[in-house]
Image: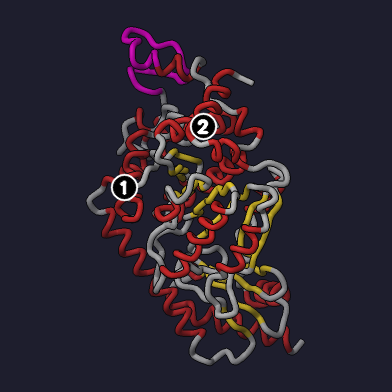
């Protein structure tokens, strides 16, 4: 094993042996090179005042070489802020700005120990880093049965982890904390589990309320007290889009510092929060009271980044940073939030109107981009196909009964026609 990896492992084991035990084989072996091209280039950038012939970019007239056909569309930006490589951890100013934003929007984080967010190539990359660092073949990844299908690829196919599902809703159509408890405590024999908490949930658009949030935290504490090392991951892809009675914070704050056997990791990003899906700017943040432990985890994370994408895109990091710094940012974001909330409310108004009879129920939703219909009489796939072929309407079929509808991408004035059309398609299939 490389000496740097060994040193990081010794730090982690000294600071928290349970966190060290959570690491995968890859997680134990990974490190960020201290002596190499990046470190030598960084040293040269600080000290080489005459000529800097270290890193593989081209310089012309004292600034990064570029094509005018590109720069003319980006003339508002200094070439050094878009063409140079971004640091592997991300643009420092952006990392700092995102940390400030996290504290402002999540008061429960205040006073807790957590690191500076590390920039990822959006959220899938952040989750992939978690899987690389902590998931080995056979490790349990605990998720609800209503989940984003990419978890299977990221943790199951790529790393060989075992996906353990529990019912998202209980008999009262509330978050099934008892199901989470059962699934998590069943891992006592393994002594380790990765728990992914995705709220607002994809595909259902559900976020727990304050009581349910406390129940989730209590379950994870109970698992830790039972001797299970828990990697608690908050997948906050749709953070901030809370429309009704739910927690309006990430559970990251309440889980941070919960127990020595709990490592809390926040994966979030500008992707959905700031409506910049193609920018691919996300973040991964670790919670711990130990600065040494946080530093070691950051080095291992940078090792994964260096070994895969090297660093994230610089232009989009600059764009997001400028947005966060703009005095107009909050007002513009509030305007978009109101649009999204009105769409969600309109969907509920339509579904609760009684106009669609008993051909479907719908799963509780109060946040995010999506909602799910539960078809009671016909196949979701049959309805999806009918919608496409006869009406030119796209939806997502999940399993036998569930049809996911992204109201986020439908104008409020078109929602009535959309759901009326889905109703027509259901009846078409029913009467075929």
- Asked whether residue 58 is drawn in magenta, I would say yes
Residue 372 pos. (x, y %):
58, 73
Q: Quadrant of the N terminus?
A: top right
What span is in magenta?
A: 43-64
Residue 133 location, quadrant: top right
Q: In which quarter of the image is the C terminus?
A: bottom right
| Residue name at image x 60 percent, y 34 percent | 27
Is 7 rendered above or below residue 196?
above
* Residue 358 is inside the magenta segment: no
**In percent of the image, x 59 and y 32: which residue is there?**
308
Which is more toward the observer, 207 or 109?
Answer: 109
Q: Left or right: 340 with respect to 145?
A: left
Determine whether, in the image, residue 212 is placed left or right of residue 152.
left
Residue topped by disc 1? 111
**Colouring scheme, one of rainbow, by chain, secondary structure, one colour:** secondary structure
Q: Position of residue 97 (x, y in %)?
A: 32, 42
Q: Tell me, yes or no, if residue 399 can be seen here.
A: yes
Asked which secondary structure carries label 2, the reply is helix
Label of residue 12 in the image: 2
Instruction: Report whether residue 311 is seen.
Output: no
Q: Nearer the viewer, residue 426 or 36?
A: 36
Q: Earlier in the sequence, mark 2 or mark 1?
A: 2
Determine the secondary structure under disc 1. Answer: loop
Q: Position of residue 214 (x, y in %)?
A: 45, 64
How far separated are the C-alphas under marks 2 and 1?
A: 22 Å
Q: Is residue 326 left or right of residue 121?
A: left
Mark carried by residue 414: none
Q: Where is residue 300 in the image (x, y as percent from the top left)?
A: 53, 31
| Residue furthest to the front | 226
Q: Which residue occupies the extreme top position in the image?
A: 50
């Amino acid at each position: 094993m490389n000496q740097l990896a060994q040193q990081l492992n010794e730090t982690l084991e000294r600071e928290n042996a349970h966190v060290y035990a959570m690491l995968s084989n890859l997680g134990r072996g990974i490190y960020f090179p201290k002596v190499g091209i990046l470190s030598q280039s960084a040293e040269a950038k600080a000290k080489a005042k005459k000529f800097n012939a270290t890193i593989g970019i081209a310089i012309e007239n004292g600034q990064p070489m570029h094509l005018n056909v590109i720069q003319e569309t980006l003339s508002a930006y200094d070439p050094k802020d878009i063409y140079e490589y971004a640091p592997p951890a991300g643009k420092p100013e952006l990392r700092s700005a995102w940390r400030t934003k996290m504290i402002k929007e999540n008061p429960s984080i205040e006073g807790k120990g957590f690191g500076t967010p590390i920039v990822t190539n959006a959220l899938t990359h952040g989750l992939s880093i978690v899987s690389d660092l902590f998931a080995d073949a056979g490790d349990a990844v605990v998720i609800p049965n209503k989940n984003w299908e990419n978890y299977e690829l990221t943790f199951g196919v790529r790393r060989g982890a075992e996906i353990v599902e529990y019912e998202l809703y209980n008999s009262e159509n509330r978050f099934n904390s008892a199901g989470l408890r059962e699934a998590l405590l069943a891992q006592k024999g393994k002594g380790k589990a990765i728990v992914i908490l995705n709220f607002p949930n994809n595909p259902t658009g559900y976020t727990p309320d304050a009581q349910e949030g406390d129940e989730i935290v209590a379950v994870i504490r109970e698992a830790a007290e039972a001797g299970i090392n828990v990697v608690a991951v908050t997948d906050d892809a749709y953070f901030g889009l809370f429309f009704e009675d739910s927690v309006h914070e990430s559970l990251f704050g309440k889980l941070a510092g919960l127990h020595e056997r709990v490592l809390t990791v926040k994966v979030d990003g500008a992707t959905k929060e700031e409506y910049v899906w193609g920018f691919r700017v996300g973040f991964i943040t670790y919670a711990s009271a130990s600065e040494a432990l946080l530093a070691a985890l950051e080095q291992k994370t940078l090792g994964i980044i260096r070994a895969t994408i090297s660093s994230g895109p610089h232009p989009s990091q600059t764009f997001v940073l400028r947005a966060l710094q703009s005095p107009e940012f909050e007002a513009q974001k509030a305007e978009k939030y109101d649009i999204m909330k009105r769409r969600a409310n309109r969907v509920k108004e339509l579904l609760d109107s009684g106009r669609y009879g008993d051909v479907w129920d719908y799963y509780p939703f109060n946040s995010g981009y999506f909602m799910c219909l539960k078809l009671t009489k016909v196949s979701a796939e049959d309805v999806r196909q009918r919608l496409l072929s006869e009406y030119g309407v796209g939806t997502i079929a999940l399993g036998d009964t569930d049809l996911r509808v992204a109201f986020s991408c439908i104008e409020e004035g078109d929602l009535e026609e959309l759901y009326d059309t889905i109703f027509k398609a259901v009846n078409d299939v029913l009467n075929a």
